[in-house]
Image (cartoon, grey):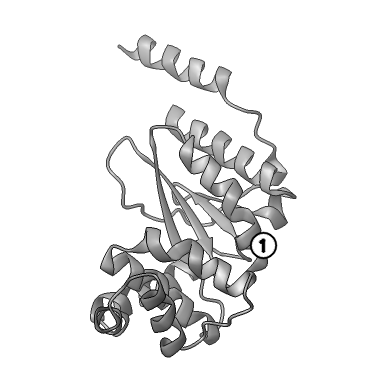
């Protein structure tokens, strides 16, 4: 049984993409993940107002469509300053209402194509309403304890993940990569794939 496991690990490593040490950093303290046994968590940290996150989105969506089966992909809003909190609230409000697919890309487009700031609850309410979400339901979720708790967790985890900028990707609570580290979106995703393989082989 041990030999079989070692052979399987060897095959995984043999087929893994080359992992350049300068395309990621190892976190000082590994962070717990919230995925099923056997799954690898890949977490994107982003901000709707970030032009690099907007440019990265098509690359990321393509990667998600072709991601390894063992990967469980998640997103977390980065909160580097108080002015980022409304966008984080909008993301978690959409999750709470189950309408993320309806507003995620429109949020990006409204900011980066139409020049809207979406920095207030009223502006965000209108965007949600324009995309078919009831305004009262939006307000209840936006102001809810559930969303407040997620904001607090995002603030905490942003510090624990040692986030240097957005977009960033955290692989299995252990490794951090991003365009400023890897040099490009392509290298960022190559590092992600290689680190997923590395975690799968352990």
Q: Quadrant of the N terminus?
A: top left
Of 125 and 42, the residue lying toward us: 125
> Residue 145 location in percent, x, y?
24, 81
Total tally of numbered discs in the picture? 1
Residue at the spot x=45%, y=20% of the render?
9
Residue placed most toward the observer, 41 or 93? 93
The residue that mark 1 highlights is 52
Q: Is residue 4 above or below residue 44?
A: above
Image quadrant in which the C terminus is located: top left
Using residue 21 as the reference point, say whether residue 12 is left or right of it. Answer: left
- For the point 36% across and 10% down, the residue is 4
Q: Nearer the viewer, residue 95 or 103?
A: 103
Instruction: Please give the name of the residue rendered at 36% of the width and 52% of the height, measured from the top-left corner.
Output: 33
Residue 100 position within the rendered picture, expressed as x and y whole percent measured from the top left? 37, 62
* Quadrant position of residue 186: top right
Q: Position of residue 180 (x, y in %)?
A: 71, 57
Residue 161 seen = no
Left or right of 144 on screen, residue 46: right
Q: Residues within 10 Å of mark 1 (few under 14, many from 20)?
A: some
Q: Is residue 76 left or right of residue 186?
A: left
Q: Secondary structure at mark 1?
A: helix
Q: Is residue 76 visible?
A: yes
Which picture quadrant has residue 21?
Answer: top right
Front in this rendered view, residue 108 or 87: 108
Please tell me which residue is depicted at 44% across the width and 67% down the height of the picture.
157
State the image coordinates of residue 200 (x, y, percent, origin top left).
Answer: 43, 31
């Amino acid at each position: 049984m041990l030999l079989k496991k070692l052979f399987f690990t060897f095959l995984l490593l043999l087929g893994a993409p080359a992992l350049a040490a300068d395309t990621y950093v190892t976190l000082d303290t590994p962070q717990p993940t919230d995925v099923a046994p056997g799954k690898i968590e890949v977490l994107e940290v982003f901000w709707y107002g970030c032009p690099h996150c907007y440019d990265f989105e098509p690359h990321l969506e393509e990667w998600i469509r072709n991601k390894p089966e063992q990967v469980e992909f998640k997103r977390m809003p980065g909160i580097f300053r108080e002015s980022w909190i409304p966008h984080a609230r909008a993301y978690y409000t959409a999750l709470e209402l189950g309408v993320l697919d309806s507003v995620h890309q429109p949020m990006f487009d409204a900011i980066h194509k139409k020049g809207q700031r979406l920095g207030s609850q009223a502006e965000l309410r209108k965007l949600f309403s324009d995309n078919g979400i009831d305004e009262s339901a939006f307000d209840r979720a936006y102001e809810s304890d559930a969303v407040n708790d997620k904001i607090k967790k995002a603030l905490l985890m942003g510090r624990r993940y040692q986030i240097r900028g957005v977009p960033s990707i955290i692989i299995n609570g252990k490794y951090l990569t991003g365009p400023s580290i890897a040099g490009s979106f392509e290298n960022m995703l190559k590092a992600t794939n290689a680190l997923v393989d590395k975690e799968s082989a352990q």
